[in-house]
Image (tube, rainbow, N blue to C red):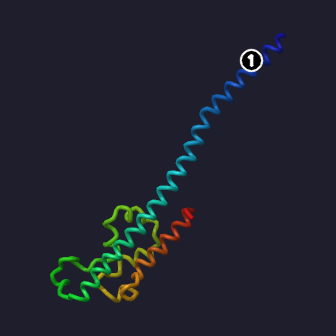
Amino acid sequence: MENTILVAIIGAIAGFVSGAIASLIAPWIKWGIEKKKLLFNERKQLLKDVREIIITEYNEHEKFTEMLAVNPDSLKDKKIYPKALSYFDLLQKHLQFQRIISFLDTSTKDSLLNFQLLSLKDRGSKLGEMPLPLTNLLENINRIEKNWKLI
């Protein structure tokens, strides 16, 4: 009879300990899974936002370039761009772009910093085509997306 009671007590203690451990580990595992989902969705949204910023700024700059072609004196008034900004300056005003700067290749950052908005030679493309610095940036974002395993 003593052996039966001892086995029952050991079984109860083992059941209690395993239940306590499971009740602590299960929420931790669930939180780990949820955290990965949140990170995945946050990164996906960040890259989507940065792409939209690039397209929006490109479209705005194309409008400016067309207006400058029609009225070269508008640059003298400096009503639109107070100085010859770089592509980097144009994009850096956006918080979402600032968040992704550290993930960009050095060559992409250099391209954005060194190419001036008001210089047609710095475009690396014809009017109506996306400038080379922005094309490089979009390619770099595609690479980041693959590295982050979002696609």
Q: Nearer the viewer, residue 112 or 78?
A: 78
Where 142 falls versus 114 (above or below)?
above
What's the residue type where badge 1 is placed?
Ile
Q: Nearer the viewer, residue 133 or 80?
A: 80
Image location of residue 112, percent across then percent down? 38, 76
Image check: 56 left or right of 80? Answer: right
Image check: 66 left or right of 50? Answer: left
Where 130 falls versus 56 (above or below)?
below
**Residue farthest to the top?**
1
Image check: 115 left or right of 35? Answer: left
User: Within the image, what quadrant is residue 107 found in?
Assistant: bottom left
User: Within the image, what quadrant is residue 135 found in?
Assistant: bottom left
Image location of residue 54, percent across then percent down? 39, 72
Residue at position x 52%, y 48% from top?
35
Residue at position x 74%, y 17% from top?
9
Residue at position x 67%, y 24% from top?
16
Where 5 falls versus 22 (above or below)?
above
Residue at position x 40%, y 84% from top?
129
| Local crowd size for mark 1, using a 10 Å CA cut-off: few (<14), some (14–19), many (≥20) | few
- The C terminus: image quadrant: bottom right
Name the residue carrying label 1.
9
Image check: 110 left or right of 86? Answer: right
Mark 1 secondary-structure assignment: helix
User: Within the image, what quadrant is residue 133 found in?
Assistant: bottom left
Image location of residue 36, percent across then percent down? 54, 51
Total numbered labels placed on residues in the image: 1
- The N terminus: image quadrant: top right
Q: Nearer the viewer, residue 138 or 107?
A: 138
**Residue farthest to the left?**
77
